[in-house]
Image (cartoon, coloured by chain):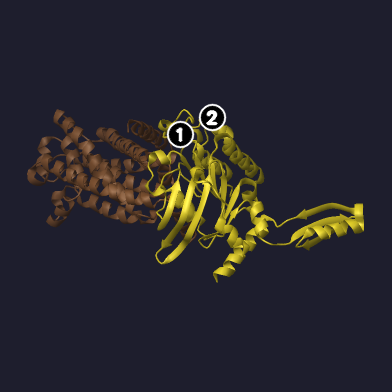
Chain colours: A yellow, B brown
Amino acid sequence: MALTGALAAGTQVPPGERVIDVRDLRMRYGTKDVLHGVSFAARRGEVLALLGPNGAGKTTTIEILEGFRMRSSGEVTVLDTDPARAGEAWRARVGVVLQSWRDHGKWRVQELLDHLGAYYRRYSTDLKSRPWPVGDLLEVVGLSALASTRIARLSGGQRRRLDVAIGIVGRPDLLFLDEPTVGFDPEARREFHDLVHRLTDVDDTTILLTTHDLDEAEKLADRILILNDGRIIADGSADDLSRQVAGESEIRWTRDGQRFVHSAANPTPFVRELLLQHGDAVEDLEVRRNSLEDTYIRLVHDSEGRAR
Amino acid sequence: MIETLRVGAARGLIELRQTLTNGQDLWGYFFPSVGLLITVFFTNQATVPGTNFSLGAATLPSSLGMLLAFGGLLTIAQILVVEREDGTLLRAKATPHGMNGYLIGKVIAVGGMTLFSVLIVLIPGAFLVDGLRVDLGGVLTLIWLLPLAVVATMPIGAAVGSSIENPRNLGFVMMPIFGLVAISGIFYPITGMPGWLQAVAQGFPIYWLGLGMRSVFLPDALASVELGDSWRHFETFGVLAAWAVAGLLVAPILMRRMAQRESGSAVAARRERALTTVGR
């Protein structure tokens, strides 16, 4: 399969630029293997999305990289250190945003950020002053008006934004985001996406995020990794991936107020024919290659077929 | 190190302020306090067997000893179990030096809470009963007894809290502790217990904390109704120190193991389980 060939080559990240470097990572619980030799790398300032069905091993992978879980075998280097043996100075350079935090309900928003920020003070450098000034941080995540609200009183979306603020209060070099926008309304999601872009642009932060939302992965990620059944089955930008999967393009147009949809493996001859026949009567012409969703479903499907 | 101490201490003071300005928590402090004061009030007319000293007046310092034990054993265990579940511990783990800051904060916050719960019994209680007195010897005893109470109980409480995964299992710890209170001579002199229960009670810190507090607040003549006709400061120190050593040996191991296991999916799994059991 063409896909396997592309994978063997992988996306090349020069060794010197690797913020994350994972080689042949394996994880076994009892007799069950949940990761079968995962390898990938991330470069500085890159946004990497980890996609995959439930149970594919996304959480296990991210927790090993966060240093929260011991691996069975394989080489893992995160910010030049093995997370399984990393110390507090490494911890200060890593930000973590998880899904199910309900902690510090009695604290006020600003109070908690001030407190947690204080742990990073000693890691401030000339290049990067830590922590992030809390006033600015509240502005960035849109919680300024709620600075003195008790955390237990925040709505779900506000709570998530606070979690993100806590994740970046130490101005991390690397940020892990686990399903960051679950429960966000579309506006909050848009604001969150802007925030991620700002982080990578201004601070050169490397971001590894997991998500179920393909649209989000496409918008945010420079590169997408698809994990299925403990293996990486695709690694590349959204465009790369859809090119890897031979599929049909969708052609839509309207003529005389009527809508038409047609699928073709190669859209060019079809469109030429269409325009020759109807000329300017063809309106709202759109040609769409495989959406990321099609690609994703196709890839996961194919890999499952191969595994059986 | 100094920086962590500073941040941790700030954390403890913030949490102390939060708990002392929260209606629900205050109710939690005053409710047992009122219960103890009522007990003291109604036993005030009774006398300690073999003396004409008020039983209520003897119960008051004993119950202070009990409150010290509760603060160190139960409060810490409870907080650890709850804060592991809501992700506070994971947050600490995700922060540089966060775990140390967390623990320093806890010692200060729980120490403050315990002191508060002692004071709201002692101050009104002192007006209810006659015969309490504190001399210089008593003050000196307090100076070594209070820190020793903290070191003897908090590590044990932390070890217990680290080994309990499910908040519902906290009950299994509460029951034996209440049982120990019943046999430790807090509400009635231990001399009235059968010999083997006396032996059991003397193996645990609650009896010794009660005894120590009685030695601070009661006239020395009352030592005659205690086991061995004395306040047994030497033995008090010995048993509490033994618990402190045991706790300080075991607690770090259990806590490290607990902390190692914390991860996003562990917190999520506990939450999931809590949600499914709530519905039942």
When asked about the image quadrant of residue B93, the answer is: top left
Numbered badge on residue A135: 2
Labels in figure, total: 2
Asked whether A152 or A91 is in front, the reply is A91
Dot 2: element? helix
Residue at image position (49%, 38%) is A172
Left or right: B14, with A166 as reference point: left
The image shows residue A257, relative to residue B53, as above or below, that is below
Which part of the image, by quadrant, shows the N terminus of chain B? top left
The image shows residue A211, relative to residue A2, as above or below, that is above
Residue B196 x, y percent position in the rendering: 14, 57
Q: Chain of mark 1?
A: A
Left or right: A250, with A178 as reference point: right
Q: Chain of mark 2?
A: A
Residue B269 x, y percent position in the rendering: 46, 56
Numbered badge on residue A117: 1
Residue B226 x, y percent position in the rendering: 12, 44
Asked whether A26 or A97 is in front, the reply is A26
Asked whether A120 or B35 is in front, the reply is A120
Q: Is residue B95 visible?
A: no
**Dot 1, crowdedness within 10 Å: few (<14), some or many (≥20)?**
many
Left or right: B126, with B162 as reference point: left
Dot 1: element? helix
